[in-house]
Amino acid sequence: MNFSMSSLLITCIVSTLLIVLLNFLLTTKKNYRFVRSNVIIALSFIIIARLCLPIEYRFTKTIPIPFLMNPLMTFLTYPLILDIPIYVILISLWILGILFNLVRYIREFLYLNRMFKKLEEQSEICKIKNLLPDYNGNNYDVLITSYCDSPKVLGSKKVIILPNIHFEEDKLQIILMHEIKHIENHDYYIKQFINFLTITYWWFPPVYILRKNIDLFLEIRVDEKVVKKMSERERLNYAQLLIHVQKSLVNKTDQFSKEYYSFLIDDSSNVLEYRIRYILEESFMKKTNYLLLVVICSLVFFSNSIIFEASFPAPSAEAPYVTISEDTLDNAYIIQHKDGTYTLFIDGEQGSIEDPTVSPFSEIPIINE
């Protein structure tokens, strides 16, 4: 296994294509008719694994693309400031961005914990069985408060938060079962993992689309489990409840971040429409097309089977040995070929060298072919 700029590039390209596909499947109308949870899980796992492991393997096939990769590698190895190559500067900015976002994440997490403690002091605290006497599952805590607009669950503490408004018994049961499923599915920890992935790839725009799609999928998965044993009438009541909560959220803001809490409903009408169609069309009761599932799972292999590389011409037997002066080092770089030979490039000129570790070649950046 090996990490390189080329492996990172192909990871970004493949991940972008897969994220676009996931977004299309999850947000385009009528796709709910053939998209199932296991398809989305498989595709999401592939994307996440690809981003977590931007490396090349033994079975990875190298595809030389000199017209694209040669200029890119030349640009990345160009010494920009104080003879520091551009790729070193970019990696440094990447690390600084991770540290900055990580500190911000921790500060917000601590702030929400402090806010939750204050919320506990000003809320009515009860158990699920106090609200649903016939409930036989885990008896989680429920906070009833006027400081939130929508039902939600704080997964790290396994606490359900309800707004201080009256719900009819059947609607209250639906709301609580929805939030219980979020806890049982460990959705909080999935969200945090995706948050850390977003922090790592803060410079990669598609990762924010991925996070939004994962949030939608978690809601669809909970909807599916809650309504699976419901009658058609009960599913209609569930859909009406989602619409009722959506209307109550118009022009309201909630202090609780979606990065740390699971909500009954998203604030997007398009997302709500998709969820309702998925429920009412009984899409969750249909089986996945196995051919589609096999095709998606095969992306695990194909997404790691190729990598783009630069391809510089190897030195010929007649290539001259090059000597350079100190004032030409800024415009030079060395290509290490797979056969162990080296080619020196200076201002468009090239020549072979034997040992890149000796002066003055030791100061020149080396690119592996």
Image (tube, helix red, strand yellow):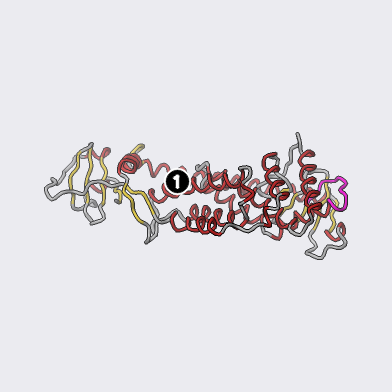
Residue 121 falls within the magenta-colored stretch: no
- Name, please, the residue furthest toward the bottom: 136
Q: Picture coordinates of residue 7 (x, y %)?
A: 40, 51
- Name, please, the residue furthest toward the left: 318
Q: For the residue labelled by badge 1, is the local secondary structure a helix, a strand or a loop?
A: helix
Residue tagged by mark 1?
Answer: 13
For residue 281, side relative to residue 81 (left or right): right
The quadrant in which the N terminus is found is bottom left
For residue 204, side relative to residue 335 (left or right): right
Q: Is residue 246 above or below residue 186?
A: above
Q: Picture coordinates of residue 322 (x, y %)?
A: 16, 44
The amino acid on which the numbered mark 1 sits, given as a three-letter code, is Ile
Q: Nearer the viewer, residue 32 or 87?
A: 32
For residue 234, side relative to residue 95 (left or right): right
- Name, please, the residue furthest toward the top: 251
Residue 276 visible in the shown view: yes
Q: Picture coordinates of residue 86 (x, y %)?
A: 37, 40
> How many marks can you see?
1
Residue span colored magenta: 161-171
Q: Nearer the viewer, residue 34 or 210?
A: 34
Q: Nearer the viewer, residue 216 or 287?
A: 287
**Which residue lies at the image location 28% right of the left edge and 47% below the top edge?**
311
Q: Picture coordinates of residue 332 (x, y %)?
A: 25, 41
Residue 164 falls within the magenta-colored stretch: yes
Q: Quadrant of residue 328?
A: top left
Residue 83 visible in the shown view: no
How many residues crowd around disc 1 within 10 Å: few (fewer than 14), some, or many (20 or more)? few
